[in-house]
Image: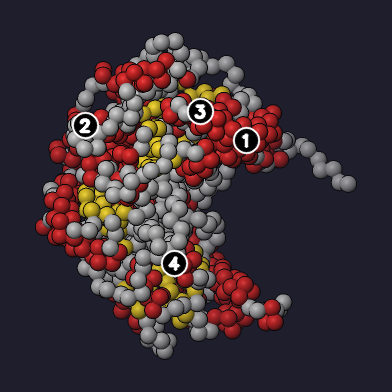
Amino acid sequence: MAKAQKLVQWEPHNIKEQLLEKYPPKVARKRAGQIMINEALSNTTPEIVANVRTIPGIITMRGCTYAGCKGVIMGPASDIVNLVHGPVGCSFYAWLTRRNQTDAKNDTNSNYIPYAMTTDMQDSDVIFGGEKKLAAAIQEAYDLFHPKAIAIFATCPVGLIGDDIHAVAKRMKDQFGDCNVFAFSCEGYKGVSQSAGHHIANNQVFTHVVGKSETEKIEKYKINLLGEYNIGGDGFEIDRILEKCGIKNISTFSGNATYDKFASANQADLSCVMCHRSINYVADMLETKYGIPWIKVNFIGAEATAKSLRKIATYFGEQELIDRVEAVIAEEMPEVQVALQEVYPRTKGKTAMIFVGGSRAHHYQELFNEMGIKTLSAGYEFGHRDDYEGRHVIPTLKVDADSRNIEEIEVEADPLLYRPRKTVEELAALAGEGLTFKDYEGLNPNMDKDTLIIDDLNQYEAEKLVELLKPDLFCAGIKEKYSIQKLGVPMKQLHSYDSGGPYAGFKGAINFYHEIDRLVNSRVWSYMKAPWQENPELSATYVWE
Amino acid sequence: MLLRHTPKEITERSALMINPAKTCQPIGAMYAALGIKGCLPHSHGSQGCCAYHRSTLTRHYKEPISAATSSFTEGASVFGGQANLLQAIDNIFTVYEPDVIAVHTTCLSETIGDDLPQIFDKAMKEKKVPAGKTLIGAQTPSYVGSHVTGFSNMVKAMAALAKPSGKKNGKINIIPGWVEPSDMEEIKKIAAMIGVSINMFPDTSGVLNGPLTGEYKMFPDAGASIDDIKDSGNSIGTLALGEWCSADAARLLDTKCKVPCSILDMPFGLKATDRFVDALRTVAGTSVPDEVMMERGKLVDMISDMHQYFYGKKVALVGDPDQVIAMTEFLVSIDMCPIHIVTGTPGKRFEERINEITKDMGQKVNVRAKGDMFLLHQWIKNEPVDLIIGNSYCKYIARDEDLPYVRWGFPILDRQGHQHFPTVGYMGGLRLLEKILGVLLDRKDRDDPESKFELVL
């Protein structure tokens, strides 16, 4: 491989200085708090600045609250009509552009995912108000599709002109009688990133949908899988494994979701949290209101998958399930090992950087570790301090103006539906067996000393990091893809997986090993220079055969 | 079926748009600004707008799209975005060092009434704009027009920079409209063959179809330079390609700098390319060289060779008005029958032009400006077609209705090559014909019974 010579030795403080040196002083001060050199101390971790405003003019990776609400959380639900109230663009850009897959096969199932619906707000609506048009659009959607539910999303101008979307939704719901209509105040300017949108979406689903199912779920070992979005079919692979183990996933938030699955979430006996960032508060609320305990799981990585399955089995505590889980792991692992052994000699010793999410900048390190790839630097696009430092910092988080305007809902035990799944003693006993509830230790403790943990990485810093540390692989999103690849470094999208996946579970791990092997060992990276650029001497004479 | 809820029966909708055939203004402004040399587009609104536009443009062009945002928060939305934009201008010139920042507004900053000229003025006074650097601004409210309008508004803002010196430069301005970088390259090539000295803006060729060399340049050495754009006020005339994309800028140069203009169709297909070439040779006072005649002849030859497969075939077509008008004419000129035609962009003239072009076709034509792809699909269900042409979203209709399908327009998210292979001009016409014939005959080969399956077609 014609790689530029590797910078083998680097000093993290020096790198940090170089990342900051070009910034105006105010920007440098702010970014200094968001760029952390990991100390990897056993019990404490240095404080990182996260979930703060993006700096105007600094090319960020982040999107907006609407993107988090409509795009991420509600987008994957197939039988809910998503109607975007605003100018056409917001609806257009969120139309089929995330790779959340849906299994709505056979035409009797409703599937509105291929439809983008919008009120296409015009200037007259902005001037005179858009409530009438919204009501008319809801009526037209109802008449055309007769869906179970219609979700309304606010875009920036809607909040500014003061359209009361919740009142319109309530009125239409009462009028229809057989269609739940609810709205999301997810204007793009709220909060500081997509994270606020996840929160707004989840709160409304919790308020308007959860607990409303009329079908009783009677299976054994019922769980919710929270924060799994079925990108590239991840959720399908996880469900395949769970099913094989005899575990019933009754509600995924929100990959391959349906209205009834959301509505049934209160019937699960355990909530398993994948993406901590986008959903941990829902897990808390499910516990408070319905008595469902929650644990953190991770199905990214074969070992992590096995570990997560064992945690679920331990929770239910029945030997039948524990044995079944072990049998499934024993059955699935050999194929994983074969694939790993095949790629390992070619991936071992490579280096990576991961800047996505949420949680994936953490979860994917599992897979990279399995392949012998070291993560030099990582960070979240929209994480909070607890995603970095662990949940123990939550009580100390400062609520700033941007967080304050994102509604927090207070829940209490449901008078009818609250049913503690385990007694206090049982939970304590499980804790004794090593099963920790309501816990997430965050990204930082998992990263080596002197690695760089960077929140809300921007284009300038990304380019600089690649230039200075020359990783073998960079992971981020579509906006970052080609500027990194122009530098001759392969880039893997870990939001949308490019066109690949699934990468979760056992089969996903195999897919990922092959994909990363393909990327870091592709011949294309050796073609950057033409032969005459590598040997530019003009005096060379051509040797005829 | 993917679009299983689309009924055949058409009911009028007054408020609900389903499956839009347009998007919002700012993305057009961002694309246009990328055709200025050394320019960083800037979105004055929430950061989500910028993220969505960058993502969509990146997926279409498969190239880095750099653009910055004012990252409005709730506070900025209440108190105005001036502080954010001033800070952004300062940061951008310090960190990324572009020659130009091209700011466009959004529904958010327009609704609260931010005034770009006033903010620019303040930025200049506060010395946030280094010497020799330029700020351009375009108002692009998302709730008016479409992405095409936004493109046009940014191009008009470029034309507003023109400064007549009193001395003509002997050049012809060409405003190419929202076409691919490959198309812009082809337009320059055609002008060069005819021997016309041109000044083209915007010009994304070399910016959005760049090479992979191991080096990343945020500002590639390509695009229309600010000096050239300013010099457009000294040109002897302007050819604006496309009424929707380019006419406003051309007319501004006319009124402001007395540079006369002609508004032509975008040169897709034989006849529109003929008119473009004819205009070029007339303004240049030259004759059309043999090499151009050779290209034209090849296209005519191919139309004749393929005619048996095209004749009478019904087509559904969706896209942006300038492109769709030219494509409709091309399809009619090869004796195909475009019968369902939709654009999402408003403009009364669109339906008039389509009706005029198709009036002798002998088929009833459904045409709608401000339409959507849900309606197009319903039309197809009521009167089936042999071919659908449009952007990547058409693949859902094509699959459900089992239609041969040619991807053409914006955005194309699932195929590659459009950034490198032009569809304008005579050579572009050849490529369009090749694509159309390919999908029609692939279908024939798939569907023919064994007894009718033939080697030679």
| As drawn, A188 above or below A270 | below
Task: Give the spatial CA distance, label 3 vs label 1.
Answer: 18 Å
Disc 2 crowd, CA 10 A, few/some/many (<14, 14-19, 20+): some
> Mark 2 or mark 1, which is nearer the start of the sequence?
1
Pick the front one: B384 or A486: B384
Residue placed at 46% from the left, 67% from the top? B400
Mark 1 belongs to chain: A
Label 2 vs label 4, nearer the camera:
2
The secondary structure type at the circle numbered 4 is helix
Amino acid type shown at disc 3:
Gln
Residue placed at 46% from the left, 38% from the top? A247
Residue B25, by quadrant, is bottom left
The secondary structure type at the circle numbered 1 is helix
Give me the disc on residue A500: none
Disc 4 crowd, CA 10 A, few/some/many (<14, 14-19, 20+): many
* Residue under pointer 4: B397
The secondary structure type at the circle numbered 3 is helix
Give me the disc on residue A331: 1
Mark 2 belongs to chain: A
Amino acid type shown at disc 4:
Ile
Q: Is residue B156 left or right of residue A446?
A: left
> Mark 2 or mark 3, which is nearer the start of the sequence?
3
> Mark 1 or mark 3, which is nearer the start of the sequence?
3
